[in-house]
Image (cartoon, grey):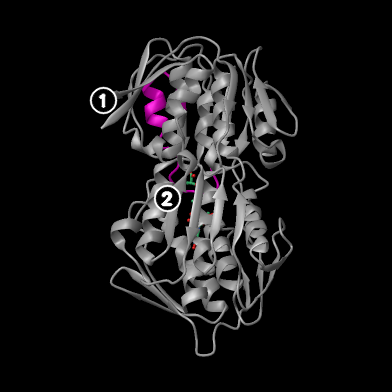
Amino acid sequence: MDSILVKGNGALNGVIPIAGAKNACLTLMPATLLSDEPLTLTNAPRLSDIRTMTQLLGSLGAEVASLQDGQVLAMSSHAITNHTADYDIVRKMRASILVLGPMLARAGEATVSMPGGCAIGNRPIDLHLKALEAFGAKIELAAGYVKAVQPDGGMPGGDFDFPVVSVGATENALMAAVLANGTSRLFNAAREPEIVDLCNMLVAMGAEIEGIGTSSLIIHGVKRLHGATYRVMPDRIEAGSYACAAAITGGEVRLEGARADEMMATIHALQAIGCDVSWDAKSVTVGASGPLKATNLTTAPYPGLATDMQAQLMALLCKAEGASVLKETIFENRFMHVPELTRMGADITTEGRTAVVKGVSRLTGAEVMATDLRASMSLVIAGLAAEGETTVRRLYHLDRGYERLEEKLQLVGADIERVDD
Ligand code: EPZ
């Protein structure tokens, strides 16, 4: 099993290309099940999660060809030959649940293994199922699988008001509603840029959706969707992660391809911490020449501060002057990085979903363990500013969401390499 070896090496400076967004691509890919015509995604990220989704779609009868060094996904699903998403694939990646809505809409039925537990929280799928039931689907749970079936005559559609904002449940509901016989309305829907990307692609395939970008979505069902070619949006979380890496080393990095308007809450947090942030139509530049300032941050659904940026910003605040209070409101167990950062000399106390980070003047390298995707990136960020060597074990967590991490960081002067354990 591989690890990452990071040595603090002074300020990072230069340009990092930002890849397509993992969390957009993982919901755009299952939409291929909605049409018998080809769907091609460009600017696709090269990640293990994308390969898992490719494997899953293949198991359902879709063809997914990875072209141009993996950045183009040419997909088609003439027919859905298997209606069951198997536990062996689903257990690798929770986002597999996103085949439920499109498969139900196109094939009239879908059986998907329930995603198991997760390090960062309980993460139930009850809202996914309640939304589909509101559209007229019949839902059964048996032997660890959820089975959804359309009523005779097809799904009429319907209204659903989300009690909690859910990205995944909004995506599944959208993909189920686009082919319904009638109109569906979603209230308190998630507004993340990845949802907007999905809506824009579905419209490019012939769907009729109103209220894109708002928390009220109206979907007028259509008879069928046609094919399309669509460019995956840039990864705002990858961009925010490298921004923290630049800032913690006192450097300046231009994030090529990042879109400021999709990551404003992160930009505001960085500015509050004392970073200089500028942007144009094609990039965002982040630098930190002065001292880092303690700042209180609270995660929230978009347009609030992304929970997927919490760990990386915590690592940055470890080097700020003063004490910062971080509140995690989305997931109940998303401080797994705290004991590992503490091994590197950080001063962090937690109580429930609140962490108090007292800035320290120095971090020291150590052997640390990755526990989930974003936690592992926070350890790499801390390692870039630490004295000595840091070894981050269980690299597979990082490979799920960061494309060519060490190459990109080497571009801006980091001393980082992948090593065999
Ligand atoms: C998506 O997960 C992202 N994953 C997550 O990114 C991200 O952290 C999360 O949205 C929040 O922004 C992908 O897009 C693949 P939710 P998702 O449904 O859809 C509760 C990363 O690091 N909830 O918005 O699973 C749930 O428990 C990953 O890239 C229910 O109660 O998140 C949580 O507390 C990690 N019932 C809250 O809602 C449901 O049916 C938000 O979860 C669904 C969710």
Residue 25 versus residue 1 in the image, above or below = below
Residue 121's tag is: 2
* Element type at mark 1: strand
* In the image: residue 199, left or right of residue 52: right
Specify the principal SS of the magenta part.
loop
Which quadrant holds residue 58? bottom left
Q: Does the residue labelled 1 lie within 8 Å of ligand 1?
A: no
Range shown magenta: 328-348
* In the image: residue 145, left or right of residue 16: left
Q: Residue 198 at x, y = what percent?
A: 61, 57
Which quadrant holds residue 183? bottom right
Q: Distance between the residues labelled 2 and 1?
A: 30 Å
> Which marked residue is nearer to the observer: mark 2 or mark 1?
1
Density class for disc 2 (Cα within 10 Å; few <14, some 14-19, many ≥20) is few
The C terminus: image quadrant? top left
Residue 409's tag is: none
* In the image: residue 349, left or right of residue 240: left
The N terminus: image quadrant? top left
Q: Write the residue at 61% across / 54% down.
A: 229
In front: 364, or 324?
364
Q: Write the residue at 43% across / 39% down.
A: 373
Callout 2, which amino acid? Answer: Gly
Callout 1, which amino acid? Answer: Asp
Looking at the image, can residue 188 be seen?
no
Q: Residue 248 at x, y = what percent?
A: 55, 19
Q: Is-magenta flag for residue 306?
A: no
